[in-house]
Image (tube, rainbow, N blue to C red):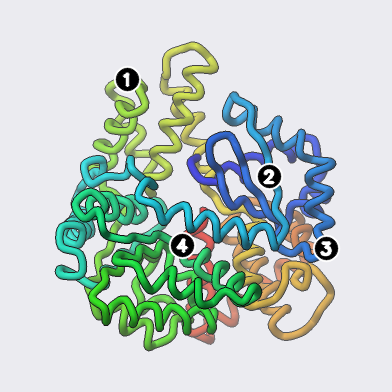
């Protein structure tokens, strides 16, 4: 558990012990964790134009959320809940903070465990760091969530900052780029926005797939890309899939992304997982029985982030229980980590509503417009195949619909997928967006 969304999913699970599912849905269905730093969790209510939900969360649930955080981390945490306007300002400030040369210092090439699954991407990143804008420009690194793409971005930045003090670097997530653009348009600060992104020597963009389908964002990024590339500035992008598989990405951006070097990262093989577990355990001062390394490697296979989360969970068990780590403890931690990294119903609703450009409230309403019905059926289908929850609970997340409606929606989506390859690709695209945010 090392991301804000992971922590928030655990908080909701703890809150569910004392609150009804209706209360959870009513107040937290569109609540998103946007940051976790030091001892502060930052939330925002996505569809809350009047700030009513934000005010209720702060007044009625802040102590319960803090108690849940205390249970997770065995320490006191503060809570901040942002309005939409506050979130736009926060996202802009956060991006500016990342512009400094001090971020991600612990993500270095030396700390990146290299194996067959990531060797090519690691070598390409090294080459870019040693010869920016000369080796491969742009460099496009792709692979599933939690495999080390962000680590390589930071590692490139750290080498360049060390060797080229005059280099101006900038890191941003694709989603934050969009939010900053919206804020700049609303506040008439487009000149400053363009100067910020078009006068850097190194632009690092994480999760670029999230600009797909956003017409104005793609337009702005297209010109930013051209300005930097034509000036001989280095661009490094990451995504959870190659450019050709980002369905709503404009062709002119796709061809530019593909004009450089594409480097993929696959899930680590058994030997690499064992090496990562040994390194993480040593890094955090965790002594494990020798046979535990192979056992964990056989049971946690998807990504590095889960492995790191498992090690931290075991450290928490050791400190809380004042005992040695044994097989029973490891099994318990593995079960909790796999559950933690599953997507939440709220995330599925959020990504589905964003993809079809309809609100979550519309999905839960009685609206029968074509896009709303499609989004509603798709989100039900995705909850059915991605979550281990009853049909009735899926219906509750969609405005209290009954199980027969859920079954019919799932069947309709499956039928449409079998007849339309394009629609099947749409489902694949939304699933990938959900997976990237776990």
Q: Front-most of 305 and 231?
A: 231
- Whether residue 401 appears in this view of the structure is no
Mark number for residue 289?
Answer: 1
Q: Which residue is mark 2?
A: 80
Asked if labels 1 and 3 touch by Cβ distance under 8 angstroms, the answer is no
Mark number for residue 111?
Answer: none
Disc 1, SS: loop
Q: Position of residue 158 (x, y in %)?
A: 28, 49
First in sequence, mark 3 or 1: give its number.
3
Left or right for 230, reference 397: left
Query: How dense is the environment of label 4, judged by Cα within 10 Å: few (below 14), some, or many (20 and up)?
Result: many
Q: Position of residue 126 (x, y in %)?
A: 18, 56
Q: Residue at x 27, y 63 (%)?
A: 264
Of badges 2 and 1, the one in the foreground is 2
Q: CA distance from mark 3 to mark 1?
A: 54 Å
Q: CA distance from mark 2 to mark 3?
A: 17 Å
In the rendered image, which quarter is residue 106 located in? top left
Q: Front-most of 143 and 55?
A: 55
Q: Which residue is mark 4?
A: 173
Left or right for 211, reference 414: left
Q: Front-most of 400 and 203?
A: 203
Q: Which residue is mark 3?
A: 50
Q: Front-most of 141 and 333?
A: 141
């Amino acid at each position: 558990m090392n991301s804000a969304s992971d922590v928030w999913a655990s908080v909701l699970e703890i809150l569910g012990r004392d609150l009804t599912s209706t209360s959870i849905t009513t107040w937290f269905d569109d609540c998103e964790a946007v940051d976790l730093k030091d001892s502060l969790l930052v939330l925002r209510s996505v569809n809350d134009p009047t700030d009513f939900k934000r005010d209720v969360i702060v007044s009625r649930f802040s102590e319960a959320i803090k108690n849940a955080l205390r249970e997770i981390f065995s320490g006191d945490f503060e809570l901040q809940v942002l309005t939409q306007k506050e979130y736009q300002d926060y996202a802009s400030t956060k991006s500016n903070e990342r512009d400094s040369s001090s971020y991600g210092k612990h993500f270095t090439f030396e700390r990146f465990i290299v194996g067959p699954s990531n060797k090519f991407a690691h070598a390409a990143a090294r080459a870019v760091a040693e010869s920016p804008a000369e080796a491969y420009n742009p460099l496009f690194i792709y692979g599933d969530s939690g495999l080390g793409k962000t680590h390589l971005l930071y590692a490139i930045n750290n080498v360049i900052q060390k060797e080229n003090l005059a280099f101006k670097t900038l890191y941003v997530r694709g989603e934050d780029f969009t939010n900053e653009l919206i804020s700049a348009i609303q506040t008439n600060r487009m000149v400053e926005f363009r100067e910020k992104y078009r006068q850097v020597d190194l632009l690092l963009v994480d999760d670029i797939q999230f600009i797909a389908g956003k017409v104005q964002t793609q337009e702005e990024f297209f010109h930013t890309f051209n300005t930097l590339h034509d000036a001989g500035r280095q661009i490094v992008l990451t995504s959870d899939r190659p450019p050709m598989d980002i369905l709503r990405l404009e062709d002119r951006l796709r061809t530019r992304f593909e004009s450089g070097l594409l480097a993929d990262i696959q899930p680590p093989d058994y030997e690499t997982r064992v090496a990562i577990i040994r390194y993480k355990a040593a890094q955090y001062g965790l002594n494990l029985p020798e046979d535990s390394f192979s056992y964990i490697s056989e049971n946690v296979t998807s990504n590095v982030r889960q492995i790191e989360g498992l090690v931290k969970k075991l450290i928490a068990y050791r400190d809380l229980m004042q005992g040695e780590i044994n097989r029973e403890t490891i099994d318990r931690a593995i079960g909790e980590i796999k559950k933690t990294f599953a997507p939440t119903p709220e995330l599925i609703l959020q990504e589905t509503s964003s993809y079809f450009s309809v609100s979550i409230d519309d999905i839960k309403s009685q609206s029968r417009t074509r896009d709303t019905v499609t989004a509603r059926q798709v989100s039900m289908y995705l909850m059915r195949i991605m979550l281990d929850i009853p049909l009735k609970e899926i219906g509750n997340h969609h405005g209290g619909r009954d199980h027969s409606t859920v079954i019919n929606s799932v069947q309709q989506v499956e039928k449409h997928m079998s007849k339309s390859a394009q629609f099947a690709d749409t489902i694949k695209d939304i699933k990938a967006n959900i997976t990237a945010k776990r």
